[in-house]
Amino acid sequence: MKNVCYILLASLLLLTVSCREASTLFGYQTVVRVGRNSLTEEEISRAIPKGLRGDDSLNYANTFIERWVVRQLKLQEAELMLSQSDLDIDQLVEDYRQSLLIRRIEQYYLEQDAGVAVAESEIEKYYLQNSSDFRLSSPVVKGFVVAFPERYSRRDWLMKMMSSPKKEMFNDFEQVCLKNNFRLIKFEEWVPFGEFLNNLPLVAASDHKDMLKVRKIAQISHNGMCYCYRISDVLNVGDRMPLFMARERIEPILRKRRQGKIISQNEERVLRQALSNGVVRMRDDVGKDLFAVEATDSLNQR
């Protein structure tokens, strides 16, 4: 088989020099024939990309012809060597075609729902009903970090304001930071502990878990700067995940559930319409647990 293939391919290199010459050997516009199948000049011309000229066009045509011949020879070899059961692929092709069509119509209905957001009430309900599924694998914290020059003349006063439990004093502290261009980062929503640590000059290799136990203002001096921070709240490993973090996992679950419902509803609708229109008839003698449907006509014909 291989020797025959090589001889034929070598011949093709000569045949493709002039498709017109080939047509006189094999018939009108035929360049090469393998068994009952033939390849024409027109088919080769359509395959050549626009813009190719001269040798580039000829080389592409040669490669295209060689691949076509090898494909035909492989198919012939398959028909000779494989059993009839292996060759019986018509049903597989039809099954695939039907599955593809069904998937297309399902996708059509799902696309109508794609822009509809999952209701917040649904997310919260799922979160509360499945709270054991949403546990933290690492700590999350709230708090703030501020950095200012160590030589700042009113450092003690600044420390007093940021430590005060009074909201008015902390607001004044924020204004001072803004006025003096001090770097102030507030974490009013839960953030991973590691993200909080990234704003401090700490040794990355340490886990710094002891910091989670302290709720007071702490200081770190580094390169002439004073870093003050406070961790005000902590959720530890195993605690329930905050809702806004769980939402990223819940929303796809609810959307997939809703998509399944949409598909089921459309299947029921199609069946009801077909029964109502007489496209499908169900035998009267069919038992409750047996579903026998006789198709009297196709939906397209109706």
Image: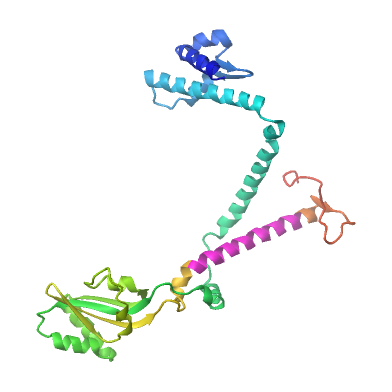
Q: Is residue 296 something that shows in the picture?
A: yes
Q: Residue at x 24, y 88 (%)?
A: 163
Q: How is the image coloured?
A: rainbow
In the picture as drawn, the residue positioned furthest to the front comes out as 206
As rendered, which of 113 and 93 lies closer to the eye? Answer: 93
Q: Is residue 128 above or below residue 156?
A: above
On the image, the x and y values in percent for residue 274 come to: 76, 53
**x, y percentage for residue 275?**
79, 55
Q: Nearer the viewer, residue 71 or 175?
A: 71
Q: Is residue 81 magenta?
A: no
Residue pushed farthest right?
Answer: 285
In terms of depth relative to the viewer, which is nearer, 114 or 135?
A: 135
- Residue at the spot 45% in from the left edge and 77% down from the top edge: 238
Q: Residue at x 69, y 57 (%)?
A: 267
Q: Is residue 125 left or right of residue 230?
A: right
Q: Which residues are magenta?
A: 249-273
Residue 127 in sight from this viewpoint: no
Q: Position of residue 194 (x, y in %)?
A: 32, 71
- In this picture, is 138 found above or below 231? above
Q: Overall secondary structure of the magenta stretch?
A: helix
The quarter of the picture where residue 109 lies is: bottom right
Q: Quadrant of residue 245?
A: bottom left
Q: Quadrant of the N terminus?
A: top right
At a point 19% along the width and 86% down the height, the residue shown is 159
Q: Is residue 180 above or below residue 64?
A: below
How many labels sit on residues? 0
Relative image position of residue 16 (x, y in whole percent) = 47, 14
Report which quarter residue 59 is drawn in.
top left
